[in-house]
Image (cartoon, grey):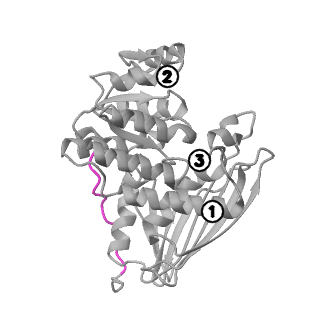
Amino acid sequence: MLAAMAFPSVLPEPRVPDPATAPPLNWGILAPGFIAGQFASALRTATRQRVVAVGSRSPEKARAFAAEHGIPAAYGSYEQLVADPQVQAVYVASPHSEHAAQALLAIEAGKHVLVEKSFTRNAREARRVVDAARKRGVALMEAMWARFLPHTDIVRQLLADGMLGELESLTADHGQRLDPNEVPRLHDPKLAGGALLDLGIYPVSFAAFVLGRPGAILASAELTPTGVDRHVSAVFTRFADHPHAQALVNCTLAAKTPTTASVSGRDARIELDDAFYQPGRVRLVSRTGVTITSEPPVLFGHHGLAYEAAHFAQLVADGFTESPRLPLDETVAIMEVLDEIRSQVKVRYPGE
């Protein structure tokens, strides 16, 4: 553990490049749903990336999405999408239940692949996808966009500098009211529904980013009538590099919660406001209450997806096959944590 530094007067500047500076990559979007639309909009607004094709099981849906976002090619199957020679990278934006099969489809076609979070249903599927990408020599990354945002890099620097002192406590939550009639997929076990994989992945990944992998997990949940998790809380302890730290993570489908995060050390704490996983400010608070706050973000809301796309495009241009900001082994380890939570709360998906 680094010795605590003198409390600063300003926070460090983020080292994240402007997404518009990343070299362009030709993207194909697989599964044109809500998040795919946000991704396409972010790329068009804030980057030089090019979305050249979209694929759906419904030709009509693909054509409508292409028309809305100015995409030149629309395909009525995923196989046609990944076979398009103009497509260099595939963004997998389908439900969690389909991620493994569709990522493997793109990898087998020799495409670089960005897979929406959570990466797969479970760690077994994640390992299979990672092994295939490494064997094929293509770039692969989980689309945990929070890892690539400017305010996350400020947190990264504060932690690396030991600004908080010895870490003691982390809290993070993500709750949205997502009723069955509004978002039925999240209540469907066949689609790997539930709060944990869709919402809880953000607090769990944040805890991994700050503290690493926990040696012990204690989880509790309430399930929906369909058998997926409605509300999950978990306590993580026994971190190898932070022996005194505890993390409390929480997620729910039943209510809009503050969706905040904090990291507290013996000398100071970091606070991230709603929504902590989107572009935002960082607040550093000393143990005596002195507070400094970062500048507001340049991009807001889902336009922040531009940062992960730009990072991925730069990786490909530089000849790398995985990200140092979110290595594939860490993505697999996070899936193992999610597996352990689901095991404790007795949530199992069909076919597992």
How far is mark 1 from mark 2, CA to CA?
32 Å
Q: Assign the magenta stretch its main secondary structure.
A: loop
Residue at label 2? Answer: 56
| Side of 81 where 64 appears, left or right | right
- Image location of residue 211, percent across then percent down: 46, 72
Residue 198, magenta (yes or no)? no
The span shown in magenta is 7-18
Instruction: Check if mark 1's residue and mark 2's residue have beta carbons within 8 Å.
Output: no
Q: Amino acid at mark 2?
A: Ser
Residue 285, horizontal then vertical, whole percent: 48, 74
Give the total of numbered labels.
Answer: 3
> Can the viewer see residue 40 in this picture?
yes
Identify residue type, mark 1.
Answer: Ile
Dot 1, how many residues are within 10 Å of its Cα: few (below 14), some (14-19), or many (20+)?
A: many
Is-magenta flag for residue 8? yes
- Tell me residue 294's x, y (percent): 40, 61
Mark sitting earlier along the chain (3/1) = 3
309 left or right of 224?
left
Q: Which residue is mark 1?
A: 341
Q: Residue at coordinates 48% horizontally, 32% vertically from top-left?
A: 36
Q: Are marks 3 and 2 in contact (CB under 8 Å)?
A: no
The kind of residue tagged 3 is Asp
Residue occupying the point 33% across, 45% down: 133
Q: Is residue 230 above or below residue 260?
A: above
- Checking the image for residue 198, the label placed there is 3
Mark 2 residue element:
loop
Viewport quadrant of the N terminus: bottom left
